[in-house]
Amino acid sequence: MLSFKPKANKKVKICKKYSTTLDGKHKEFVNEFNKNEYDIIPKLKEERHELKTQLTSQTDLPIEQIMEIKDRIKEINNTTPPPPPNSMAKMFAHFGCSGMPCL
């Protein structure tokens, strides 16, 4: 006679469409960063460069159009993110380490 009861094999159904995992979230962020880096930021830089050349090359523009161009350049400068700082240095400073990872 068996002294233990055999374990029943249960299958847990997980809906992959609605479940969020760390890997899935990481992939979303990486895709968003790549889209920004390769699609959006180059277009904004090109537009800013065209606006600056238009502003400097044409001197007979009305004041309203000059102000609109300057405002658009400011909007572009505010929407493009600065390059990321050295995250390792920030992490070491945060945890009080001098250059080697804290263990």
Image (cartoon, rainbow, N blue to C red):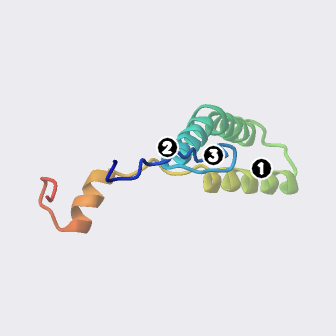
Q: Quadrant of residue 75?
A: bottom right
- Amino acid tagged 3: Lys
Q: CA distance from mark 1 to mark 2?
A: 42 Å
Q: Measured from the top left, where is residue 57 in percent x and y?
A: 73, 35
Q: Quadrant of residue 24?
A: top right
| Nearer the observer, 93 or 67 | 93
| 1 and 3 marks in contact (CB < 8 Å) | no
Q: Measured from the top left, where is residue 97 in percent x and y?
A: 15, 62
- Of badges 3 and 2, nearer the viewer stands 3
- Of badges 1 and 3, nearer the viewer stands 3
SS class, disc 1: helix
Mark 3 — residue?
13
Q: Measured from the top left, where is residue 65 in percent x and y?
A: 85, 51
Mark 1 — residue?
69
Mark 2 — residue?
23
SS class, disc 3: loop
- Amino acid tagged 2: Asp
- Of badges 1 and 2, nearer the viewer stands 2
Mark nearer the N terminus (1 vs 2): 2
At 73% from the left and 43% from the top, the residue drawn is 55
Q: CA distance from mark 3 to mark 2?
A: 19 Å
Q: CA distance from mark 1 to mark 3?
A: 56 Å
Q: Measured from the top left, where is residue 38 in percent x and y?
A: 60, 31
Mark nearer the N terminus (3 vs 2): 3
Asked if 3 appears above or below 42 in the picture, the reply is below
